[in-house]
Amino acid sequence: MTAPRTLTEMFFDAVERYSTKRAALRHKVGGQWTSITHQELARLVHHAAIGLRELGLEAGSRVAILSHNRPEWAIADFACLTVRCVDVAIYPTLPAAQIAYILQDAGAAAIFVEDDEQYDKVAQIRAEVPSLRKVIAFTPLREGTDAESFQHLIQRGAAAETRYATYRQDALAVQPGDLATLIYTSGTTGQPKGVMLTHGNFCSNVAAALKVVRVSPDDSCLSFLPLSHSLERMAGHYTMLHGGVTICYAESMDTLAANLLEIRPTVVIAVPRVYEKIYARVLETAMAGGAIKRRFFFWARRVGHAWVAATLARRPLSAGLKLRYGIADRLVFKKLRARTGGRIRFFVSGGAPLSSDVAAFFFAARLPVLEGYGLTETSPLITVNALEAPRLGSVGRVVPEVEVRIAEDGEILARGPNVMAGYYNKPEETREVLDPDGWFHTGDIGELDAQGYLKITDRKKDLIKTAGGKYIAPQPIENLSRSSKFVQNAVLLGDRHPFPIMLVVPNPAALTAWAAERQLKLAEGDAWLQQTDVVAKLEREVMLTLRDLASFEMPKKILLVAEDFTVENGQLTPTLKVKRRAVEQRHAALIEAAYSPPV
């Protein structure tokens, strides 16, 4: 398959190449899964694109998309690309104030909104964005809004089709270096920055990805990571279309388990938190089944890990291990495969480090999770594990056409055709991360082994430096603590303090079950967070998971908090990364008390 040079070339090639397939996209309508063929997709994109022209949008105009994943998102994106507009992807979970900042910074002339909820956010800040002239709604809105319906946009374009005879020719005139999109970073350390990604950035990354992780028209994927996320945009959207994979849009994160069983996909792309939650549910089920079931589960997990270690090292399996694994697979791992639809060829994980224990459990269930690494600024893929030779605990080898080197301070530097053109309207910030030789400074700390596998140890800016001068990487420690079923979430803090501390969100279900077994009554409201037995139990659980840490890495105090860290309360980014400053501000009094000397 010839690698296309631009996204418009990729789109036209795909809809022609796979014109005999039954479905390019699938989504649920009225409770039934409905298909959109490649030919129908081409028609809808064509008419939506002309509709945008009829609204006065020109090449270079900024057009925002504020919606969860759905076919209209894909149609709007390709419509923008084929009329050479620059689309601006916005997370639908963002509040109005952050949306206003992005629309202002991008100079958006129009915006697609999903529904009344997203329309209301835009209406709230409309006066703050003078450049915004048009609002287009994917679904019918309530009476009295000034939005144009998506259906009317399509009809407008169909009626004017004959006036745009050079539509395809004009679309294909775009160059690889032309701007395709602005994707705003999650903003863990400040205001979001608009990452300028070109047609060539994405196309080079799609081509590189397909040389390592192969897909075919026989595959189907379940799309649920936000399309405003660079990983889903490149891997779950452009790569899948180019490879002929049928893209199925999950109804929501809440229906993910049901949609997996309905669609039975062969490929799924997710962030580590999704795999952690699946693993936690399996563990919780095992723990709730009585002593015999618990012992058998942990035996099966040990057998599975032994099987994985031997298999990945390409060592011969002993007869005993084969027998034990067969029993463990039949009684434990087979059930997990069934819960994911029974047809998964592989999962892909990105966006944050994946626990090796979680990855090994999925591999033991013959559900390989191919961990990769990249950033929005690199379109995003830099490295990924290949299905033929994965290495747990690593993020794989560098993909074709991309270079990686480790700076003296351990920072990962990347260079290649996938590296962004820069941050929109921010030349100084661009110079801070892009050096004159084209190396992008990722801000991540890592190391390359002798076989070229990259291991991420932490974020450079997230490194904790204690008052004693010791550096601590918090993410691996947080991942370890979450391996306990009693820990729902955790954040390690301690920068410029004498020692690290950890904020822990207990798992209410696991804690309630534990208390019931011991006939311990939990206090009302949040008072249980101060109960001596509860605090002691959580401290034991966390310290057990962290028993192999160096003494300076070990949190000296465990602070329990009831409220989880979420996007809605501002403590997680839309890509589920912890906003450490926001967490510290939210719990400032608790943290200050932990570091105050006893009176």
Image: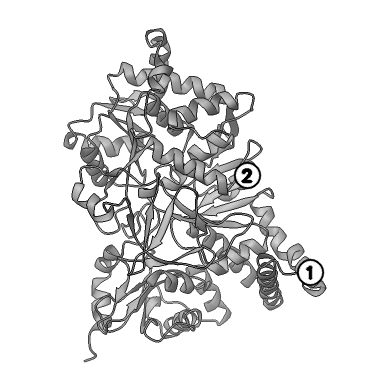
Query: How many residues crowd around disc 1 within 10 Å: few (fewer than 14), some, or many (20 or more)?
Result: some
Mark toward the viewer: 2 or 1: 1
| Image coordinates for residue 198, horizontal then vertical, percent | 36, 37
| Residue at figure coordinates x 23%, y 41% from the top left | 100
- Would residue 301 be seen by someone viewing this image from the given angle? yes
| Image coordinates for residue 405, horizontal then vertical, percent | 40, 61
Looking at the rendered structure, the kind of residue marked 1 is Lys
Location of mark 1 (residue): 322
State the SS at label 2: loop
| Residue at figure coordinates x 54%, y 47% from the top left | 255
As displayed, is residue 572 above or below residue 594? above
| Image coordinates for residue 539, horizontal then vertical, percent | 44, 82
As displayed, is residue 168 above or below residue 404? above
Query: How many residues crowd around disc 2 within 10 Å: few (fewer than 14), some, or many (20 or more)?
Result: many
- Closer to the camera in the image, 109 or 593: 109
Q: Is residue 229 left or right of residue 235?
A: left
Looking at the rendered structure, the kind of residue marked 2 is Pro
Q: CA distance from mark 2 to mark 1?
A: 28 Å
| Residue at figure coordinates x 45%, y 41% from the top left | 204
- Closer to the camera in the image, 363 or 454: 454
Location of mark 2 (residue): 265
Q: Is residue 19 left or right of residue 204?
A: right
As displayed, is residue 34 above or below residue 469? above
Q: Is residue 277 left or right of residue 352?
A: right
Q: Which of the two discs, 2 and 1, labels the residue nearer the N terminus?
A: 2
- Closer to the camera in the image, 149 or 57: 57
Please tell me the numbered disc located at residue 37.
Answer: none
State the SS at label 1: helix
Residue 74: image quadrant is top left
- Closer to the camera in the image, 575 or 467: 467
